[in-house]
């Protein structure tokens, strides 16, 4: 099977993603992506009955044996937050100060 992601298409994707890759890195990643696409194509070839839901898997997990959901409770720990912010090179009123990231048009 020919590569689905050609060097030209990969170079275009690298430009869109604003990545800086050396030639060896780029070729390695392109081959990895093509390998992943090949694996997906092989999975597409597996016959699956039409009545199987898309998220189904082979291990039954009925509601009777499932753990209940944990309560989603927000816990505020101001002391922990203060210790974390204190480790930052620069902070202002409890917030991290980060350098401005210049916007560039792609």
Image (cartoon, rainbow, N blue to C red):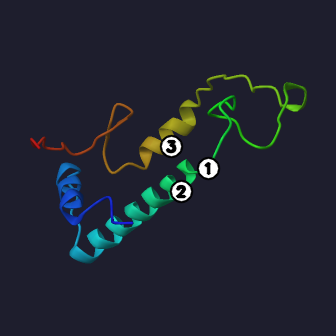
Q: Residues within 10 Å of mark 2 (few under 14, many from 20)?
A: few
- Residue 32: x and y, percent? 40, 66
Query: Which residue is disc 1 drawn over?
Result: 46
Query: Which residue is disc 3 drawn over?
Result: 83
Tell me which corner region of the image, top left, top right, bottom left or bottom right, holds residue 94: top left
Marking on residue 42:
2
- Residue 31: x and y, percent? 36, 69
Q: CA distance from mark 2 to mark 1?
A: 7 Å
What residue lies at 9% left-to-right and 41% top-to-bottom?
A: 105
In the image: residue 50, left or right of residue 9: right
User: Counting residues from the N terminus, which is met first, the one under dot 3 or under dot 1?
Assistant: 1
- Compare residues 50 and 55 and report the one nearer the observer: 50
Question: In this rendering, is residue 88 above or below 66?
Answer: below
Tell me which corner region of the image, top left, top right, bottom left or bottom right, holds residue 54: top right
User: Counting residues from the N terminus, which is met first, the one under dot 3 or under dot 2?
Assistant: 2
Q: CA distance from mark 3 to mark 2?
A: 50 Å
- Compare residues 96 and 30 and report the one nearer the observer: 30
What residue lies at 43% left-to-right and 56% top-to-bottom?
A: 37
What residue lies at 27% left-to-right and 77% top-to-bottom?
A: 24
Question: In this rendering, is residue 41 above or below 30?
Answer: above
């Amino acid at each position: 099977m020919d590569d689905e992601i050609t060097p030209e298409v990969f170079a275009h994707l690298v430009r869109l993603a604003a990545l800086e890759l050396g030639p060896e890195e780029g070729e390695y990643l392109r081959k990895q992506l093509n390998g992943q696409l090949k694996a997906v194509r092989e999975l597409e070839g597996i016959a699956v009955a039409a009545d199987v839901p898309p998220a189904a898997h082979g291990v039954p997990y009925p509601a009777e044996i499932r753990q209940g959901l944990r309560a989603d409770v927000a816990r505020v720990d101001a002391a922990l937050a203060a210790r974390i912010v204190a480790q930052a090179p620069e902070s202002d009123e409890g917030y991290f100060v980060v350098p401005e990231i210049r916007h560039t048009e792609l």
